Image (cartoon, grey):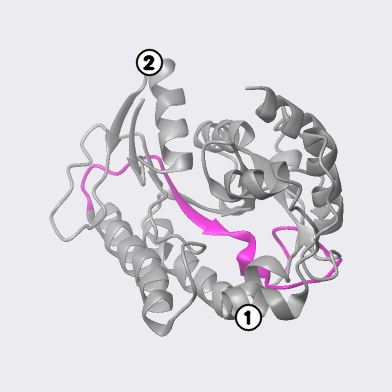
Amino acid sequence: MKVLVSGSSGLIGSALSASLRDDGHEVVALPRTYEEPIDFSGVDAVVHLAGESIAGGRWTAARKQRIEESRIVGTRQLAEQLAGSADKPEVFICASAIGFYGDSGDELLDEESGAGEGFLSNVCKKWEAAARPTDEAGIRTLSIRTGVVLSTEGGALKKMLMPFRMGGGGILGNGRQYMSWISLGDMVRSIRFLIDTDSIGGAVNLVSPNPVTNREFTKTLGQVLHRPTILPLPAFAARILFGEMADELLLGGCRVIPQKLLDAGYQFRNPDLQTVLVELLRQ
């Protein structure tokens, strides 16, 4: 296949690109802006992963605008180019996030569940809507609602490792908020599964079938590292440190399952949190 990938230098994009190339496929990195025409000749799939990091700093008004515009404007431009192309790919896979569901307590959520409230939920709704031109043009279009991607190479786990290894790990807030996660390996394999599975379209949750609470995650990571996890970060302190971002990324959560992947027969290689953490931390 010939696959175009945006965000190809990021954690997910670089792993996906390497996996495709290892199997003999051609991968072309897309730019971050799409004002200039893109040649889609011979392209089988487009995977759009680019976007401003949501966890790179406090959510000032300017940063929230960059987060939103980097997803919505870029996605719309790319989708409109794809829709208007004479040589259309078979499939367009566009990143989204489980932030779509908002802070949902312990309610079990699948792809049929409605949108939540808050900044991230609103961004995700607009983000997915921005990909609509490809669907209307007859291209199989998927919005992949991604959970916390676990890898020692980047993302949330990499940031957690230093304080946890120093014995400074602990629950966030009351620890009851759910964390829907996926290993980087399963993230890459599931995207490739979606490229190859013509029967799947629309929104797809890319998470492990076994979400855990923040308390469970904290306990498990501490056990794997053989470190205590007795230093909690109270909600008020999280809000002082991180502002609005604390409520949506740290103190809130959603309990999401990958129903479409399971129904389609995808087999998770790393469905168990402790097994994943042991495997990652032995590398």
Q: Earlier in the sequence, mark 2 or mark 1?
A: 2
* Magenta-span inclusion, residue 101: yes
Indicate the position of residue 140 as horizontal and vertical percent values.
46, 48
Residue holding disc 2: 24
Indicate the position of residue 150 as horizontal and vertical percent values.
63, 41
Q: Residue furthest bottom?
A: 61
When the figure is inspected, residue 139 is found, relative to residue 251, above or below; the finding is above
Q: Residue at x 83, y 35 (%)?
A: 226
Q: Residue at x 46, y 33 (%)?
A: 16
Indicate the position of residue 84 as horizontal and vertical percent values.
24, 56
The residue stretch that appears in magenta: 85-113
Q: Give me the C-alpha separation between circle 2 and circle 1.
A: 49 Å
Q: Helix, strand, or loop for circle 2? A: loop
Instruction: Name the residue type under label 2.
Output: Gly
Indicate the position of residue 111 as horizontal and vertical percent values.
69, 58
Q: Residue at x 75, y 53 (%)?
A: 169
- Left or right of 128 on screen, residue 70: left
Instruction: Name the residue type under label 1.
Output: Ile
Q: Residues within 10 Å of mark 1 (few under 14, many from 20)?
A: few
* Magenta-span inclusion, residue 195: no
Q: Return the residue nearer the eye: 169 or 205.
A: 169
- Left or right of 118 on screen, residue 55: left
Residue holding disc 1: 240
Q: Return the residue nearer the eye: 127 or 61.
A: 61
